[in-house]
Image (cartoon, coloured by chain):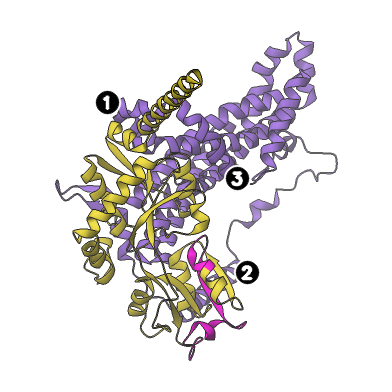
Amino acid sequence: MRDQRAPAAGTDTAAAAPGPDAAPARPPPARARLRLGWLDALIAGLCVLAVAWLAHQVNTRLDYRWDWSVVGAYLVRVDPESGAWRANLLLIGLLTTIRLALWAGLFAAVLGVVLGLCRIADALFLRILARLYVELIRSLPPLVIIFIFYFFISSQIVPLLGIDDFLRGAAPATLQAVNVLMGPPQLVPAFLSAMICLALFEAAYVAEIVRAGIQAIERGQWEAAGSLGLPRRDTMRFVILPQAIQRVVPPLAGQFISLVKDSSIASLISVQELAFMAAQISATTSRIFEVWISASAMYFGLCFGLALLFGRLERRLGRGLR
Amino acid sequence: MRGWHRRGVMALGLAAGTAAAQDAELAASSALEQIKQRGTLKVGVSPTLPPGAMRSKDGEVIGFEADVATRLAEDMGVEVEFVPTVWDGLIPGLLSGTFDVVISVMSMTPARNLTINFTDSYSGTGMFMAANKEVAAGLASAEDFNSADVTLATMRGSTTTTVAQRMMPKATIRQFEDEALMVQEVVNGRAHAFLASAPRPGFEVLANPEKLFLPLEEPLVRSAEAMAVRKGDPDFLNFLNNWIFLRQRDGWLEQRHAYWFDTRDWADQVALQQ
């Protein structure tokens, strides 16, 4: 599991009750270092120097004429008929990436929770099944999964669903809705394949996070609930899950952010997301570095924004449940 | 004797009947019929191959190949729908039915032809090299480049790689996913030369006159680009071949090819200076 600041590590309750060797009345050391010292300034200065040196090297060694105007032209365009601003390829790609990540994240969460619960179920069959799935998916690189899935499985399934014919015969209002939810209708089959594939892939990781989150709850909680006469199902629902949720939010957030980045492999099966758009634009204009740096900045903005958002969610959950 | 004769005639008639039925079935299942019924021609294209196929700053697929596909659809009386696809996904996408035809600067090769059908060639270019003035100074022929000290940059999965391997087997070949990165590697002097179809090498020399030069007068090989369709569809193939023949006859193909390959009048369409 990547990004596993594991739920087991979040033993907040343990921190409140110091162990026997903890020195009694000493303030925690983090408090004392709120001001920046000269050493910090020195390290920061060295970092800036290193970056500046690298930039200088790139500029002199790399024979490259920078031209950022291309990026602007491919971010937004002016509609020739109405004169209005329209999103151009890069922004459309970013939107597709967001759509892909949201849908895949949603399905991965549902499937992952079910699988996670199966992993700790009483029934041996469910445990074996879930274990098999998780181990299989986690042992394959996403690149391989998406190729196998797209060319062997989805080319069989998607035509069966009749999505293509449905979309061609659909009413304008339906198409409008599809356009908002999943992007241009004619590209929906590829989008769906990528979405299902990413969801199946991420679900394995979500399942492990959920399992670890539940198993990290102390045995005492189970025993206490049992001694109160709560059946297993109610113990899970009222005692274990509320505590587990608080613990799995940080690793789940990390998993979602990595899903956003993983979505770039969908470019391999020609989903028109950010990485694919960037590849086309860089080939068309030969402005490789400008285009890829811009795409990186967009990925960073998206992921960092999500990190901030999840940080707030975490704090709020922490307040509500403590 | 008469009995045998009659049975023979009957059997023959029966066989002819089934054959006719099969032919009708084949014709009905042709991509041609599906396209007419659907009202759109779905074209697989990799818009990473300027000036054959690229993305305009209005977000459209443009280039010589796009013109060919648009005119083809127009002559069929249907709409054209481009399915932008990564280069490696073109043949798998065609086979899995994601699009009806590949029109994407694809040169005919026997290896490809084993899995897909090619139409007659509608366009052809030569493959040239552009080399770095510093590291490849004095090299002027394929034999000069055929040395263990030389590094060549090619595109993965493209004919540039096979040509380099065949004609310059001693050189180190580095394969790239992205043509722009391949060119940059030579501009930076980390590879001696790159192989690409005309007009890319010439354009890159114009864009980097103090860094690159054209070592060869004649092309390494001449390529023949054709449309690709699925096997087992003679009707569609016949239609496309005759369309190409007619558009060659009336000079339309030549005129569009000249516009995209011999001029740079289209540069402002892709936000580049001319």
Question: Foreground: B78 or A220?
Answer: B78
Q: Position of residue B136 (x, y in %)?
A: 50, 86
From the image, state whether disc 3 or disc 2 is nearer to you: 3
Disc 1 marks which residue?
A173
The chain coloured purple is A
> What amino acid type is highlighted by mark number 3?
Pro
- Is residue B148 a member of the stretch shown in magenta? yes
- The chain containing the residue under callout 2 comes to A
Check whether the beta carbons of the residues at disc 3 and disc 1 lie within 8 A of each other: no
Which chain hosts label 1? A
Q: Could you tell which of marks 3 and 1 lies nearer the N-terminus?
A: 3
Chain shaded yellow:
B
Q: Amino acid at mark 1?
A: Ala
**Alpha carbon separation for disc pair 3 and 1:** 36 Å
Please indicate, yes or no, whether residue A310 appears anywhere in the rendered image: yes
Q: Residues within 10 Å of mark 3 (few under 14, many from 20)?
A: some
Q: Name the spot of residue B232 as percent of width and height, x first.
A: 44, 40
**10 Å neighbourhood of mark 1: few (<14), some, or many (≥20)?**
few
Q: Which residues are magenta?
A: B135-162
Real-space CA distance between mark 3 and mark 2, rounded to the nearest whole angstrom: 43 Å
Q: Is residue A184 magenta?
A: no
Q: Secondary structure at mark 2?
A: helix
Name the residue at the right extreme.
Answer: A20
Q: Secondary structure at mark 1?
A: helix
Residue on which the image places disc 3: A142
